[in-house]
Amino acid sequence: MKIFISAIIFTLSFASISEAKSLTCQSFQAIDGWKGTATHDFALLTATVSANNELASAKLSGAVLTSAGTSTPDTGFTSKSPRYQDYTRFSALEDAWCWYSPFLPKQLATLPEGTVFTGFVNRTCENGSSTNIAMKCVIE
């Protein structure tokens, strides 16, 4: 019986792993950033999209370098801007001075592989500056 239950748990965990999709986004334009010294490069957002819409191992690299972590959707978020009505705000990734909140389609986990779309990352820094970074994204 224990072997049977273990086999079921293993099968379910394997199924959830196989459902995960990769997300890769690159900024349309080079941005000013910081990685120990000033940079001017493209920003790259990478993550694994889980079935429950979480971004696992999410990180930004390129012009900036954030710590990797899980970014969760803010299900209570409602945009005041019509541009972001179909987007969900995700919890922020951070570097030493700024926070980066991805804005991605609400049904991200259900998008088929090969889907290309525009995503956004809102950068808010300790000095009070804030900007949105538009990115070309693909589900793989």
Image (tube, helix red, strand yellow):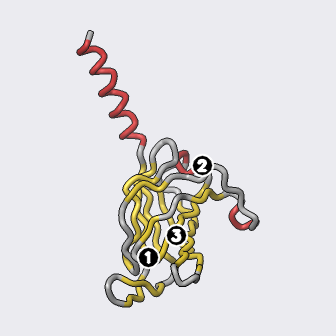
- Residue 52 is left or right of residue 19, and the answer is right
Q: Residue 70: give x, y in percent of width and height.
A: 42, 54
- Residue 53 is left or right of residue 44, and the answer is right
Q: Residue 43: give x, y in percent of width and height.
A: 44, 76
Report the number of discs. Answer: 3
> 115 and 92: which one is in front?
92
Picture quadrant of residue 68: bottom left
The local secondary structure at tag 3 comes to: strand
Of mark 2 and mark 3, the one earlier in the sequence is 2
Q: Amino acid at mark 2?
A: Gln
> 94 and 11: which one is in front?
94
- Residue 26 is left or right of residue 62, and the answer is right
Of mark 1 and mark 2, the one earlier in the sequence is 1
Mark 2: few/some/many CA within 10 Å (<14, 14-19, 20+): few
Picture quadrant of residue 85: bottom right
How far apart are the alpha carbons under marks 3 and 1? 11 Å
Of mark 3 and mark 1, the one earlier in the sequence is 1
Above or below for 54 versus 5: below
Quadrant holding the C terminus: bottom left
The local secondary structure at tag 1 comes to: strand
Which residue lies under the disc numbered 1?
A: 43
* Residue in view at x 40 percent, y 73 percent: 95
Which residue lies under the disc numbered 3?
A: 136
Above or below for 103 versus 122: above
> 5 and 138: which one is in front?
5
Which residue lies under the disc numbered 2?
A: 107
* Residue in view at x 37 percent, y 77 percent: 62
* Residue in view at x 48 percent, y 61 percent: 138
Q: Amino acid at mark 3?
A: Lys
How far apart are the alpha carbons under marks 2 and 3? 17 Å
How far apart are the alpha carbons under marks 1 and 2? 23 Å
